[in-house]
Each structure stands twice: as structure tokens, then as C-alpha cells.
Amino acid sequence: MEKKLVYFLCTGNSCRSQIADGFLKALGSDHYEVKSAGLEAHGLNPRAVQVMKEAGIDISNNTSDVIDPELLNRADYVITLCGHADEHCPVIMNKNVVKWHWGFDDPAKATGTEEEIMEQFRNVRDSIKNRIETFLKEGK
């Protein structure tokens, strides 16, 4: 059985799309090919790497990439994780693609003490994990 391609998109491909990428690869790589990208490449957020490590998933070797039109048009699922990416997503030529928007707050914009900021990252991480688990169970 050919794996379906899931393409996670965010503005900078540094936090939310990387977390989603990490969870789907860890939990569903037997059924899905997983890629992530951004409208821009902002680099991998070290706090995202840290909270994923706490969850037992290493994303430290992931790269922050810009959207690849070829991957975008080959994707079975295109899932945006922030409103900006949803509004500015390039035109997808593949008419069979399933496009969803899963909106999550940007933990990189969190303020406060380091512990408060990390708590925001953990909350977003856990919300994304729950959403990925639902996707794997229901296919949506």
C-alpha cells in the first residue's frame, strides 16, 4: 500500500508544523509520508525541540524548509497550523488534495518567565498530539 503524503504548513516551519511532523512520523509513519514546511524558513525553534524530547520524540535533525510546490501538488493532505499560512497558502493544483486548517496558538509568541513560556509550548504540543491521534483514528 502506498503511503499518503501529509504536508504540514506553518508560517516559519519552526514550531507547530515541526511538532505535528514529529508526532505523525512517530505515530503514523507506517501509513503516511510526512513533510512540513513554511511560507518562510525561520529555523527550528529550540524550545520545540526540547518539549518534543520531553515527549520522547527527537526532532533535532529536522530542517526548517520553505514550501516545495512539487510536494504541495503531490500531497494527499495539506494541513495548515496557523491562520497566516492558511490565508497565504499557495494555490494547490492537485484537485484531489484534502486541505484542512488546524489552528493552534503560536508558542513562540508566548511571554513571561521561561517556565511560563515552556508551559505554553507543552500545551500546544499536547493539543497537536491529540489532534494527530484523532487524525490517525478517524482519518480526518
Image (cartoon, helix red, strand yellow):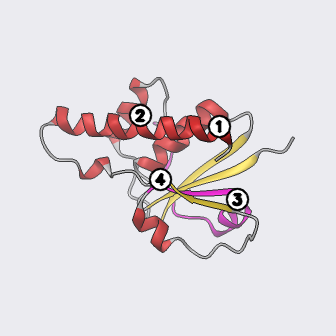
Q: Secondary structure at mark 3?
A: loop
Q: From mark 4 to mark 1, how far is it between C-alphas?
A: 24 Å
Name the residue tied to disc 2.
126
Name the residue tied to disc 1.
136
Query: Which stretch is magenta?
Result: 60-81
Q: Residue at x 65, y 51 (%)?
A: 6
Whether residues under marks 4 and 1 lie with C-beta atoms below 8 angstroms apart, the answer is no
* Quarter of the figure with the N terminus: top right
Q: Is residue 18 at all visible to an observer of this figure? A: yes
* Label 3 or label 4, whichever comes before in sequence order: 4
Whether residues under marks 2 and 4 lie with C-beta atoms below 8 angstroms apart, the answer is no
Q: From mark 3 to mark 4, how far is it between C-alphas?
A: 18 Å
Closest to the observer, 24 or 40? 24
Name the residue tied to disc 3.
75
Query: Whole-percent x and y of residue 79?
Result: 56, 56
* Label 1 or label 2, whichever comes before in sequence order: 2
* Label 2 or label 4, whichever comes before in sequence order: 4
Q: Secondary structure at mark 4?
A: loop
Q: Quadrant of residue 135?
A: top right
Query: Whole-percent x and y of residue 46?
Result: 34, 40
Query: Mark 1 belongs to which amino acid?
Result: Leu
Q: From mark 1 to mark 2, how far is it between C-alphas?
A: 15 Å
